[in-house]
Amino acid sequence: MKLYIHMKTPDALDDAVIEYAEDKLKSKDPNMIAAICDEEDFAFAIEDAKDEVKKILSKWFKYNEYATIEVDTDTKTAIVKEVKGY
C-alpha cells in the first residue's frame, strides 16, 4: 500500500540551497571568499549558484517549496515524486 505525504518546505529547501551554493563556490577555489572584494559580489555569486541548483530541484519541488513523498509500506521504501508536467 502506498502513502502520499505532501510537504511545504520553503525554509528547509532555501537553507539547503544556500548551504549548497556556498559550498560549491568554496569547492571551486578555496580562496574564492577572500578574492571577492565585497559582500555584494559574494551575494551575486551565491544567487547565481542558487538559481542553478533550484532549476535542478524543480523536478521534485513545485514553486521551490512543495514536495510529495511516496511511501510504499509493503516494500518499506520512499521516493520523492516528480512534479507533474516537469
Image (cartoon, rainbow, N blue to C red):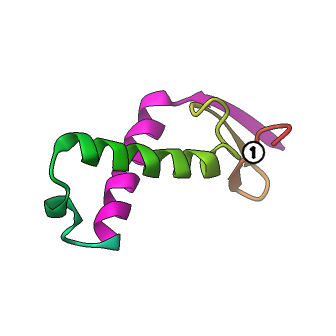
Q: Position of residue 51 (x, y in %)?
A: 52, 45
Q: Left or right: where does residue 1 sit relative to residue 71?
A: right
Q: Left or right: where does residue 50 sit relative to residue 28?
A: right
Q: Position of residue 41 (x, y in %)?
A: 26, 46
What is the magenta segment's predominant secondary structure?
Answer: helix
50 part of magenta stretch: no
Secondary element at tag 1: loop
**Mark 1 surroundings within 10 Å by alpha-carbon count, few (fewer than 14), some (14 through 19), many (20 or more):** some
Q: Position of residue 12 (x, y in %)?
A: 43, 36
Mark 1 = which residue? 81
8 part of magenta stretch: yes
Residue in view at x 44 percent, y 52 percent: 49
Report the span colored magenta.
1-27
Q: Left or right: where does residue 77 sit relative to residue 41?
A: right
Task: Indicate the quadrant containing the C terminus: top left, top right, bottom left or bottom right.
Answer: top right
Q: Nearer the viewer, residue 1 or 36?
A: 36
